Amino acid sequence: MREILSTSTETSPTIYGLTIDKLTDWVESVDEKKFRAKQIWDWLYRQRVQTFEEMTNLSVRIIDKLNENFIMNPLQQVVVQESADGTVKYLFMLPDHMMIETVLMRQSYGLSVCVTTQVGCNMGCTFCASGILKKERDVTAGEIVAQIMLVQKYFDERKLDERVSHIVVMGIGEPFENYNNLMNFLHIVNNDNGLAIGARHITVSTCGFNPKKIREFAHEDLQINLAISLHAPNNELRSSLMRVNRNAPLERLFEAIDYYTETTNRRVTYEYIMLSGVNDSSQVAQELADLIKPRNKLSYVNLIPYNPVAEYIKYERSAKDNVTKFYDILKKNGVNCVVRQEHGADIDAACGQLRSKNIKKEVLA
């Protein structure tokens, strides 16, 4: 059996899960002055210490209280894969020994991290490796924040003058099914006195399983970007690819999207994975253009090369010529679109693939 280093089974929550308001409440609950919360926050996210004992301007009493009530880092690095293009894929172990994935991507505009919000996924998309292993639990806000902190730790330890500047919530799971933890995470990483990752540098992706959540998201006081996993322009095709469409068909989904854009005046990105012979024909491209055109002022289509998954051998990547034709049809119809740059094609690039492969190794060992 492949050796895995032991990890803590500590049941205390990670301190990374507290917003600044909740941290302030906790500080006052242990009879400490309110300003101590800001000191702790600074140590966590500006100084990025690894233990509470490194918080040198705190008393022994409050450090003891912190150790009694919280752990700091709930994740352990199990596997790291680095691509020739600089993409790094991490497999992390949670305190209960469950596994999640995180991806670092080097972009022209900075360092972007893709985080996971659930252990496994129940959305049932037939092309996605995330759903090979079903959902076991939600990832806590602190465990999502910790993914960012461990990636940043790599650069801090090497004294590299680089910082995580962008976040995409597009890893394993459906973020809007873990809504409260998602929102706490967003408030923590967006805080100006902490990691200070700008709201417009953060994108949350949903498959639209619950259109009501899109409406709710429209009223959050954050300028976070919204992306929709679309992948098909009609109900018959989308339902064959994405089980969620049977309960939330395109009519309901786009009613919610239209509400979101009217409420926020913010653009929505549509993710569209290109599957050979499935959703990449000229006819389907025109259908997609007809669907998006009425909303084009606040729409952007992201055409995504498919990363093959061994379990889904019926799907293949669209040929470059087909992608080009598809793109051209959208552009001729005035649809804003781009073909997404690939990252990590030479490693376990598909979302959920690294986790699935390593868990299967454990079962077979």
Image (cartoon, rainbow, N blue to C red):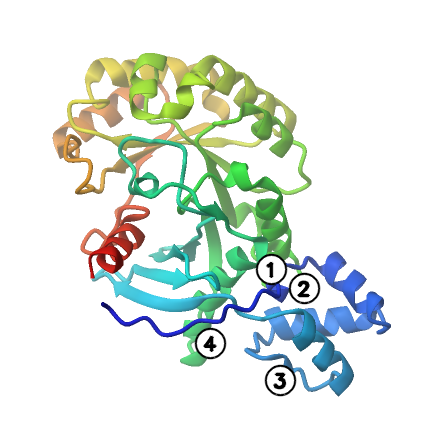
Disc 2 + disc 1, Cβ < 8 Å: yes
Tell which of 121 and 276 is nearer to you.
121
Disc 1 crowd, CA 10 A, few/some/many (<14, 14-19, 20+): some
What whole-number distance in Å separates the C-alpha atoms at marks 2 and 3?
Answer: 19 Å
Label 2 vs label 1: CA separation? Answer: 6 Å
Q: Nearer the viewer, residue 243 or 95?
A: 95
Give SS at disc 1.
loop
Q: Position of residue 43 (x, y in %)?
A: 64, 75
Query: Secondary structure under badge 4?
Result: helix
Of the numbered discs 3 and 4, the one sitting upstream in the chain is 3
Of the 4 image quadrants, the one containing the N terminus is bottom left
Of pointers 4 and 2, the one earlier in the residue sequence: 4
The residue to which callout 1 is attached is 196
User: Looking at the image, is 316 positioned above or below residue 193?
Assistant: above
Q: Amino acid type of disc 4?
A: Asp
Percent position of residue 24, x then y: 78, 63
- Residue 156 disc label: 4
Q: Distance between the residues labelled 1 and 4?
A: 16 Å
Circle 2 SS class: loop
Going by the numbered disc 1, the residue's amino acid type is Ala
Between the C-alphas of marks 4 and 2, the distance is 18 Å
Is label 3 in a helix, a strand or a loop? helix
Label 3 or label 1, whichever comes before in sequence order: 3
Residue at image location 39% in from the left, 62% down from the top: 92
Q: Mark 3 points at which residue?
A: 54
* Residue 33 picture quarter: bottom right
Q: Which residue is drawn at 13% across and 32% down?
A: 319
Where residue 193 is drawn, which disc sits there?
2
Quarter location, residue 46: bottom right
Q: Is residue 339 shown left or right of residue 201?
A: left
Mark 1 and mark 4 lie on one chain; the one further toward the N terminus is: 4
